[in-house]
Structure formats: C-alpha cells, structure tokens
Image: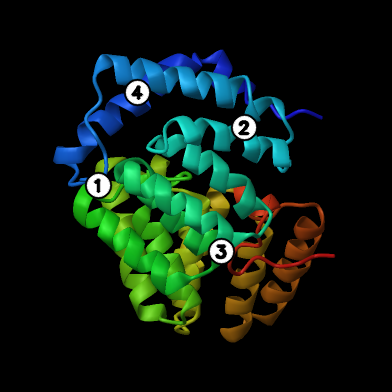
Amino acid sequence: MKYQNNCLLAFGFLAMLLFLACKQQNSDTAKGNPSAAKLNQADIERQEQIMQEHLVNGAWKEELYSREWQEHIDRGLAKDSTIAYLWQQKAMPLFKQAKYELGMRYIDKAVKYDPERWQDYRAFIKCIFAKTYTEAIEDFQDYKSKYGNGFVMDHSCNFYIGLSYLQLNEFAKAEQVFEEDHQAQLKEYGADWLHHLDLFYYGISRYEQKNYQGAIALFDQALAIYPDFSEVQIYKAKCLAKLGRTAEAEALKALGEINGRKGNTINEDSVIYERYPYQLRWN
C-alpha cells in the first residue's frame, strides 16, 4: 500500500511549508546558525515547490521503507540541500528500521539547517530509538540552553532527560529531574495536564531507590488517569510486596498480567517500533 500523509495534506501542506521555511529564514542570526542562509520570498516559494514535487507528489506516494522514497527525497536535496525537513524525512524511515547510524547522519543535517525545529527530535531519537542515553542528555541540555524546555512527541525535554538517567541507573538524578518537571507542569498547566507515563517513570525513579511508599503515591496518580496500565500495576505490586502487603500484591500482579495480555501497556506512538524502558513483554 502506498504511504500518504493525508493528515498533513488535509490541513494545508503548503501553509505548513511556509511556516517551516520562514523559521529557517530567521534561524541564521536569531538562532546562531551560520549555515542557514536568509530566505527571500522567491527562495521560500522555490523551497515550497521542491517539497511539493518531491514529498507530496514524490516520496509520500511511495512505501515508507522503499528505495523510491529515498530517491525522491535525494532529488529534492540535489536542488536544495538546505531544506531541513527533507533531511528529517530521509532519516525518519531509517530509524523505524533500526538503521540508527545511517539515520543519524541525515538528522544531523536537519539539525544543522534548523536546530530549533529538529534538535529536540534528534535527542528524542537518541533516547527512545538509538538508546545512546548520555548523548541524548547532552543534546537535550544543549537544546534547553538555547530554546528552553520544550515538548517533543508529547513529552518535555526534561521527561526524556529523566528517562535517560533512569537507563543509566542514575536514579537520584532521574528523580530530581522528574520532580522539577512535575512541579513545573503543575504550576503552568495544572493537574489535568499530567501524563500517566510521566508519573510512571517518576514513580520508577523512587522504586529503584527503594522508596516504595513514594513510588506507590505516583503509581496511584498514573492509574487514576489510565486505570488498566499494566506496567504500573505490576510495579505497584512489587512495591506492595516489599512492604509486606502480600495479598494485595498478588491480586494486583494478577490483574496487571491480565491487562498486559490485553494490550494495556505503554501507548506511545513509537512503541510499535521500540520497546520503552521498563515495558514488560507479555508474549
């Protein structure tokens, strides 16, 4: 089946391209990116035309993992190698095929030409896909120093920094980052903004430090949002067992296993490509 990004088309692809191009236009001086050239209106229209021809009417009409996808993008880049979005679209299918080293070459190009738009995405790839956690932390911290703690793939930069510390077994650092992020979100957006996955990993940072009561408090908040979240149920059961609440632990573990086999697990978009930290296998 041919791959088409109908959502982008439906919402007006050309408007999105204009936005991306305008961001690139301003990036050379305002964002400290000497590689980017200022774009006049003619340049913007030319880049729009290239993306229309080689993405909308080219790569997006092919299978995502096909050679044809890559060839269409290469033809666009041959016309203008400074279009960051073309580099990202060249890299993205490779990450989904676990071709991390190759994909990283291309996403580095996207960051070169539009760091504000793509550096946090690259850091996300390092954390969730390539699993180079020290590099992910460094990339996110550098991004934050330039642009602040933004959001990528539904979570803050600090979320991924905390997650990377978890994967490096630096549990106290992870808890500190999760706590700061938690308080910042509460202050700016309120409790309704909190995400069950943020609360799960914040709880894991406490669990790994044997703060079982503190972990349970966060796991309960996650379950209030996502009641059948199997990993939370299993790790809460582990905490209950450590606290000597054996009957509760066994009952919750059994429920967690049922929910896990039903597919009530981590529900991030990227989970179909990568297993997330602390995600359990049920088959």
Q: Which residue is mark 3?
A: 101
Disc 3 to disc 4, C-alpha distance:
29 Å
Q: Which residue is mark 1?
A: 187
Q: Is residue 247 above or below residue 40?
A: below
* Type of amino acid at the residue the image marks with label 4: Phe
Q: Which residue is mark 2?
A: 72
* Type of amino acid at the residue the image marks with label 3: Glu
Disc 1 to disc 2, C-alpha distance:
46 Å
- First-in-chain label (4 vs 1): 4
Q: Nearer the viewer, residue 131 or 240?
A: 131
Q: Are marks 2 and 3 in contact (CB under 8 Å)?
A: no
- First-in-chain label (4 vs 2): 4
* Type of amino acid at the residue the image marks with label 2: His
Which corner quadrant of the image does residue 173 belong to? bottom left
Disc 4 to disc 1, C-alpha distance:
30 Å
**Element type at mark 2:** helix
Which corner quadrant of the image does residue 235 belong to? bottom right
